[in-house]
Image (spheres, rainbow, N blue to C red):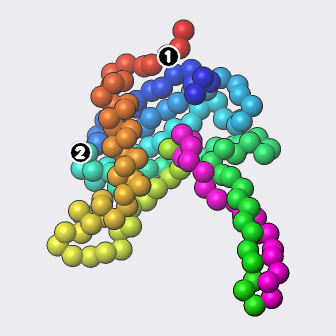
Amino acid sequence: MKKITSIEHIPEDDNDNFTIKFSFAPNDYFENDTLSVKFTMLDEGQPLKSEGTEIKWKEGKDITKKTVTKTQKNKKTGKTRTVTKTVDAESFFNFFKSITANDEEEGDDEEEEVIFSCPILTFSFFFKYSLFINKIIGRRCSKT
């Protein structure tokens, strides 16, 4: 977070869609100078999807993933084995992952179902909305 040099809110003129753009100083984790996430809206305050910048992580520096090692014991043989897998980790940078609401359901309340069928998208939008739009709208936040 210390490497963020500016945050910018970029609204689209003809609709409610907007982009949040973060600029970064050079760092040890990724190559990108800027990361952004665009929110496509169904209606004001109702997100349909978010499209984030692909982060170009430096070798071994992806902090959105972690390695988990588990020991498993076979009930029949009693032998133990170690299983290692990579799983998602909680990170500020998950904000930049693209998320699309599941729009396969049909019915009279289709629009409402699309929005609430993807709680991560809804949470991501409202988190961003309250944190950035209400505090930064109409101005840029820069370090000096």
Residue, far bottom: 76
| Residue located at (61% from left, 55% from top) | 88
Residue depicted at x 39% and y 38% = 128
Mark 2–mark 1 CB contact (< 8 Å): no
Q: Position of residue 15 (x, y in %)?
A: 28, 43
Secondary structure beneath label 2: loop
The reply to whether the magenta stretch includes residue 83 is yes
Q: Amino acid at mark 2?
A: Glu
| Magenta extent | 77-94
Question: In this rendering, would 46 be left or right of 38?
Answer: left
In percent of width and height, residue 56 lies at 69, 43
Image quadrant containing the N terminus: top right
Looking at the image, residue 127 sits to the left or right of residue 63; the answer is: left
* Separation of residues labelled 2 and 1 (CA atoms): 27 Å
Residue 102 in the image, given as x and y percentages of width and height? 38, 67
Q: Which residue is mark 1?
A: 142
Say which amino acid is labelled 1.
Ser
> Which quadrant of the view contains residue 19?
top left
SS for dot 1:
strand
Dot label at residue 44: 2
